[in-house]
């Protein structure tokens, strides 16, 4: 059966599972990690008491050599993977809210940094033209200044978040004691580990 990937759909799925005797005490939920698309579902089933597992899609694909790809084939493959490889499943628990927000901000910061570099490169190209046009240069200067402002805003917020959590602050400060590790690298290492 198919269910909408939203709260109502998850509740319908839970009711369907319960109608077949599938309960938290006798079952586990196994999903492919699909970025943000499975996040709500993981939170929902975890809150219902199910043992919840997010598996890397490549690991699931490598376990089987199926050529077809459809929701039905994928569902069956993930279910079989969860059964056959139960001893190596990755337990999923909700991430720490501060770490999740910092991870989101780091991703945004990276995007803004790429935007800034692209704008600087475009400005270099425009200024090297034989004829000079002030409007494109002004627009690019504005774009560069705006992205720099946003990057600084993100940096301030990440520092504020880390400083309000003594454990995370301690981790970042310890990481920064390693030669060559600055604030951003320490935050990234903290998120990955």
Image: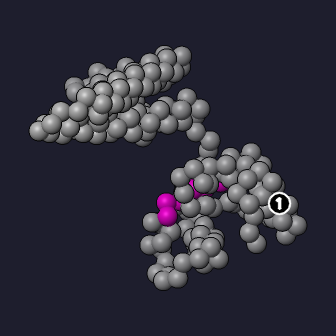
- Image quarter where the C terminus lies is top left
**Count of numbered tags:** 1
Check the image and report above or below for 129 versus 67: above
Q: Is residue 21 visible?
A: no
Judged from the image, the secondary structure of the residue bearing numbered disc 1 is helix
Residue indicated by mark 1? 12
Could you tell whether 74 is left or right of 14 in the image? left
Where does the magenta region start and end? 52-57
User: Which residue sits at x=62%, y=73%?
Assistant: 71
Check the image and report above or below for 28 versus 154: below
Is most of the magenta stretch helix, strand or loop? strand
Q: Answer with the quarter of the image where residue 129 lies.
A: top left
User: Which residue sits at x=75%, y=64%?
Assistant: 3
x then y, percent, for residue 22: 80, 64
Tell me, yes or no, whether the highlighted magenta stretch contains residue 55. Answer: yes
Q: Which of 132/37 is in front?
A: 132
Q: Is residue 141 visible?
A: yes
Could you tell whether 155 is left or right of 48 in the image? left
x then y, percent, for residue 38: 62, 54
Q: Answer with the quarter of the image where residue 117 lies.
A: top left
Could you tell whether 130 is left or right of 166 in the image? left
């Amino acid at each position: 059966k198919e269910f909408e990937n939203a709260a109502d759909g998850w509740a319908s799925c839970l009711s369907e599972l319960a109608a077949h005797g599938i309960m938290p005490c006798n079952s586990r939920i196994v999903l492919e990690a699909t970025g943000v698309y499975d996040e709500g579902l993981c939170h929902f089933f975890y809150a219902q008491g199910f043992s919840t597992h997010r598996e890397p899609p490549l690991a699931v694909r490598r376990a089987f050599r199926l050529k077809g790809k459809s929701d039905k084939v994928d569902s069956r493959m993930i279910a079989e993977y969860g059964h056959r490889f139960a001893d190596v499943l990755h337990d999923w628990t909700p991430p720490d809210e501060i770490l999740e927000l910092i991870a989101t901000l780091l991703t945004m910061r990276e995007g803004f940094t790429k935007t800034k570099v692209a704008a600087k490169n475009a400005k270099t190209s425009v200024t090297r033209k034989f004829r000079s046009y002030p409007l494109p240069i002004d627009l690019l200067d504005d774009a560069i200044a705006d992205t720099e402002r946003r990057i600084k805003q993100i940096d301030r917020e990440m520092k504020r978040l880390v400083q309000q959590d003594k454990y995370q602050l301690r981790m970042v400060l310890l990481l920064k004691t390693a030669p060559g590790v600055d604030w951003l690298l320490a935050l990234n290492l903290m998120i990955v580990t």
